[in-house]
Image (cartoon, helix red, strand yellow):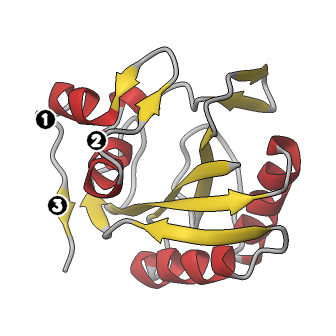
Amino acid sequence: MIAWVGIGANLGNAHANVLDAIERLSRLPGATLRQTSPLYRTAPIDSSGDDYVNAVAALDTDLDAHALLQALFAIEQAHGRERPYRNAPRTLDLDLLLYGDQVIDDAPTLIVPHPRMHERAFVLAPLADVAPDLVIPGRGAVRALRAQVADQAIERLG
């Protein structure tokens, strides 16, 4: 199964945290890192704090969606992730964006596709770099969705 993971951080050395998360994803048991996007910088949405560094990664995985989500939480915890309130600044945020073409609604634990990914340039811009024809179930192709969030400020790094 191909799973897409959103990666973001805005506390501590956010750039290093995102790169470390990608490295940890590459060593994740039951998964193979297939592809990563370039890094991007964005201002927080519905939050506060420093700008975020964001990326996306594709994993080929034998893990089921819930087991993969738990593995992502473990990587976040290794970075000292705390969840004091919704959209709090974070040392690392890993979101399971897509799990193949499956639609999963085990709210509040797991919702796939990620419920707001189609509205966020910090997800769609990195995805458009590496998989513009990828289809988000129920929403459409990344390329078309990216055009709909063109007004959201985002800067490609490097």
Occupied quadrant, residue 73: bottom right
Give the secondary structure at mark 3. Answer: strand
Give the secondary structure at mark 1. Answer: loop
C-alpha span from label 2 to label 1: 7 Å
C-alpha span from label 3 to label 1: 12 Å
Where is residue 118 shown, x and y percent of the image?
39, 28
Neighbor class of circle 1 (other Cα within 10 Å; few <14, some 14-19, many 20+) is few
Where is residue 20 shown, x and y percent of the image?
57, 83
Question: Which sits earlier in the primary sequence, circle 2 or circle 1?
Answer: 2
The image shows residue 77, relative to residue 17, as above or below, that is above
Where is residue 52 shown, x and y percent of the image?
37, 61
User: Disc 2 marks which residue?
Assistant: 121
The kind of residue on which mark 1 rests is: Ala
The kind of residue on which mark 2 rests is: Ala
User: Disc 3 marks which residue?
Assistant: 155
Where is residue 145 shown, x and y percent of the image?
27, 27
Q: From the viewer's perspective, is 103 left or right of 124?
A: right
User: Disc 1 marks which residue?
Assistant: 150
Question: Which sits earlier in the primary sequence, circle 3 or circle 2?
Answer: 2
Neighbor class of circle 3 (other Cα within 10 Å; few <14, some 14-19, many 20+) is some
Question: Which sits earlier in the primary sequence, circle 3 or circle 1?
Answer: 1
